[in-house]
Amino acid sequence: MLSVFLQTSAPEQLNPWKLIVGASPVVQLVMLILVFMAVMCLYIIGAKWIRLKQVTNQSRAFLQVFWSEEKARAWNAKAMNDIHAKAMDYDRSPIATVFRAGYRELARIARTGRPTKADVENVERALRRAQSAELTRLENKVSFLATTASTAPFIGLFGTVWGVMNSFIAIHGQKSAGLDVVAPGIAEALIATALGLAAAIPAVMAYNYFVRRIRVVDSETAAFASDYLNIIRRHLLVE
């Protein structure tokens, strides 16, 4: 008899999915925004991780091609032509892209003769433009991770405040402060908080990781551009 009494008097357990479906429209909108932000972050994280892996692998492979030419022969127009032909296979490498930008500028200058000091400045500007464009391309969509990391907890907090407010309104309307009155509103509010944290935590971790990786790639690209200009000055420049 006691077990039957306990079963009939035990409160119904709250189902998270039922809470989400039965939440107020404002809280549902908050949850929908947070789910969208979380899905977008996962997509960006996956796509950016694959892209940076391709960048690293292709840049290493291109640098091996580039410096092997220096060991095999003196730097000259033929060596640059050979490297440029191979550089076309490394379209994901910022270093190869910077090399191609410098090569195109050298080819334009070569139509009027060997490059002078003034011409080298044009090559340097072309390298800087290409490097800046590659950095912008790598940073594309990373700012969304930072936006999610900084705003998702506050969006979730807004949903939490709204849910708690609804609980207090229910207490006032039913003149009762029992758990059966306040629990649904507080539970849906906590779900909004949990979704905000679930979206923000991976976003901030991924943002810091990608910013560090992109900074390394940009430094390697800048170092290569400097070495490339030194080669032009030493071997291809008309004094």
Image: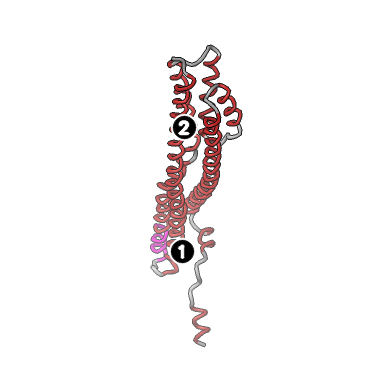
- Quadrant assignment, res 79: top right
Is 79 contained in the magenta span? no
| Dot 2 crowding, Cα within 10 Å, few <14, some 14–19, many 20+ | some
Q: Quadrant of the C terminus?
A: top left
Say if residue 147 shows up in the picture: no
In this picture, residue 88 sits left or right of residue 3: right
Three-letter residue code for mark 2? Phe
| Dot 1 crowding, Cα within 10 Å, few <14, some 14–19, many 20+ | many
Q: Position of residue 59 (x, y in %)?
A: 53, 37
Give whichever of discs 2 and 1 has the lower sequence position.
1
Three-letter residue code for mark 1? Pro
Tell which of 148 and 42 is nearer to you.
42
Q: Secondary structure at mark 2?
A: helix
Bounds of the magenta span? 165-174
Tell which of 135 and 8 is nearer to you.
135
Q: Is residue 211 above or below residue 84?
A: below
Way the structure is coloured: secondary structure
For the point 40% across and 53% down, which residue is it? 157
Q: Is residue 92 above or below residue 112?
A: below
Residue identified by numbered label 2: 224
Q: Position of residue 236 (x, y in %)?
A: 49, 20
**How far is mark 2 from mark 1, CA to CA?**
60 Å
Q: Please state the total of marks drawn on the protein image.
A: 2
Residue identified by numbered label 1: 184
Q: Secondary structure at mark 1?
A: helix
For the point 46% across and 34% down, which residue is it? 221
Q: Is residue 221 above or below residue 81?
A: below
